[in-house]
Amino acid sequence: MWCSSPTFRSQNKVAAAGAALGHDRTVTEVVRTRRQPPPFHRVAVQEAVARSPRMVRVTLAGPELEGFVVDEPAASVRLLLPSPGTDELVMPTWNGNEWLLPDGSRPAIRTLTPLHADPAAGTLDVDVVLHDGGVASAWAAAATPGTPTAVSGPGRGYEIDRTAPAHLLAGDESAVPAIGQLLEALPDDVAVEVHVEVTAPEARVALPAHPRLTEHWHDAVPDEPPGAALVAAVRAATIPDGAHVWAAGEAAAVQRIRRHLFDDRSLPRTQAHVRGYWKHGRAEGGA
């Protein structure tokens, strides 16, 4: 969820356009490739423990995770999963644009927040939201010690401005792991207000303690798109001068939050960090 889209120009289309204009010169194909992400490290599930009926914490372990360091909170890792219908983990190859399996198909890759990385022990925790129809959700629900997977990363996290007088953190269930990391990293002497939307009350989990934390949990609004309650909460929140905002969750919902912050409140863009973690209709939790 963190890479920009590549740009491709089809040689055939450009040549056809040149012929239509009466051009009789050779057309050179222009291809821009994406920067290759970090390689995948083979790991296996060490244990899987439920944090709530809606979230499971999976501990990954393996020699290839030794030295794996996550420097910033709210960072990201890619988790390579077995293709649906099989337990076999097949490693993909980078083709300059995307990861592909040997048969040319796309692998099942999901992006999650890396938690509690121990580079000495070679372990890494990730939290996965459980929901119907999700590849990562089904994998996490069935994970047992020894279940194979692979990890790529970490991607860049959130650089905290320690001079900010206050922070507003907002997200849905997929953002809970990152919110927890931010609470652990934020200075003790600044006010922190947290808003989280959950699909059901049993999805609430204990957040890390912070001396000046005010937390609000919001149940999803029936018959409304995901994030409706979160958007309303941000719109109603008091944001002190100089405060920084971090928000993540369903893409359309956080886009509404982005427009509200920048257009309605005229918040400087340097004071807001807003990220879409998943798209309604193509849900994958635990980012």
Image: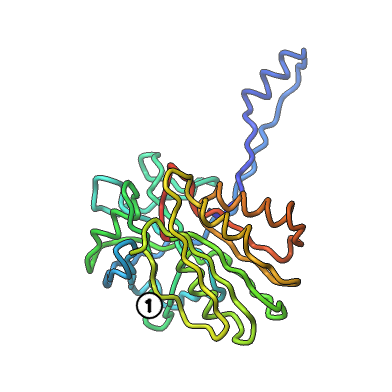
State which quadrant residue 79 falls in.
Answer: bottom left
Which residue is tagged 1? 122
Q: Amino acid at mark 1?
A: Gly
Q: Nearer the viewer, residue 263 or 115?
A: 263
> Splitting the image into 4 quarters, where does residue 235 fall?
bottom right
Q: Position of residue 76 (x, y in %)?
A: 50, 64
- Where does the image place residue 152, in percent across and percent down from the top left? 45, 62
Position of 110 with respect to 131 (left or right) is right
The image shows residue 31 at horizontal and vertical percentages of 64, 39
| 146 versus 104 height, above or below | below
- 276 and 19: which is toward the camera: 276
Q: Residue at x 41, y 83 (%)?
A: 120
Which quadrant of the figure has residue 53?
Answer: bottom left
Q: Nearer the viewer, residue 258 or 43?
A: 258
Q: Is residue 232 above or below residue 168?
A: above
Judge from the rendering whether residue 239 lies leftward or rightward of residue 184; answer left or right: right
Seen at 69% across and 57% down, the residue is 261
Residue 54: percent from the left, percent from the top? 33, 61
Q: Residue at x 62, y 54 (%)?
A: 257
Quick one: SS at disc 1? Answer: loop
97 left or right, relative to 141: right
